[in-house]
Amino acid sequence: MELLLPLAGIALLWFFLIRPASRRQKDLARMQSALAVGDEVILTSGVFGTVTAAADDHALVEVATGVVIKVARGAVGQIVTKVDEPAEEPAEDPAEGPADHATDPAAGEEN
């Protein structure tokens, strides 16, 4: 009975801290191994870029037009846009109203 409380504490520690951390680490490794040419990525340093080539242990990332840097795959922190995903178009802001101001009653009479 005296050992039950410490064992329960260890089990809770593993369940809430160690298990989620190892899951995140596996997901990150899976994402880094799935890099493809054309993916828009964020490096762990906060730099945005597009993958231009990928090898086993490194990738070439274009960070500006004509500027390509060689980074370790582990430096890729997140894939922003995959090659096969369509880019999202920004939704029209309803607060701005219609784009045609000639028919807007607040803009005055129509010309």
Image (cartoon, grey):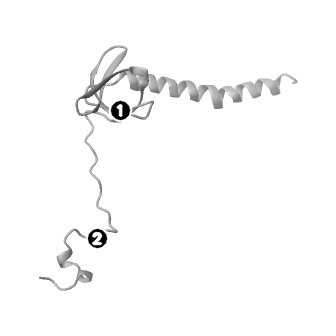
Q: Residue at x 34, y 13 (%)?
A: 56
Q: Secondary structure at mark 2?
A: loop
Q: Residue at x 80, y 25 (%)?
A: 6
The one nearer the camera, 21 or 46, is: 46
Q: Residues within 10 Å of mark 2 (few under 14, many from 20)?
A: few
Q: Where does the image place residue 57, in percent across and percent down from the top left?
A: 37, 14
Q: Where does the image place residue 44, in percent across and percent down from the top left?
A: 45, 30
To which residue does mark 1 refer?
41
- Is residue 55 shown left or right of residue 27? left
Mark 1: amino acid: Val
- Is residue 87 shown left or right of residue 24? left
Q: Where does the image place residue 31, in percent across and percent down from the top left?
A: 40, 26
Q: Residues within 10 Å of mark 1 (few under 14, many from 20)?
A: many
Please tell me which of labels 1 and 2 falls first in the chain: 1
The one nearer the camera, 28 or 74, is: 74
Q: Which quadrant would the N terminus be assigned to in this image?
A: top right
Q: Where does the image place residue 88, in percent across and percent down from the top left?
A: 28, 47
Would you place residue 55 above or below residue 23 in this image?
Answer: above
Residue 92 falls in image quadrant? bottom left
Q: Which quadrant would the C terminus be assigned to in this image?
A: bottom left
Q: Residue at x 32, y 63 (%)?
A: 93
Mark pair 1, 2: CA separation: 34 Å
The one nearer the camera, 101 or 79, is: 101
Mark 2: amino acid: Gly
Q: Secondary structure at mark 1?
A: strand
Would you place residue 12 above or below residue 97 in this image?
Answer: above
- Residue at far bottom of view: 109
- Residue at far right of view: 2
To which residue does mark 2 refer?
97
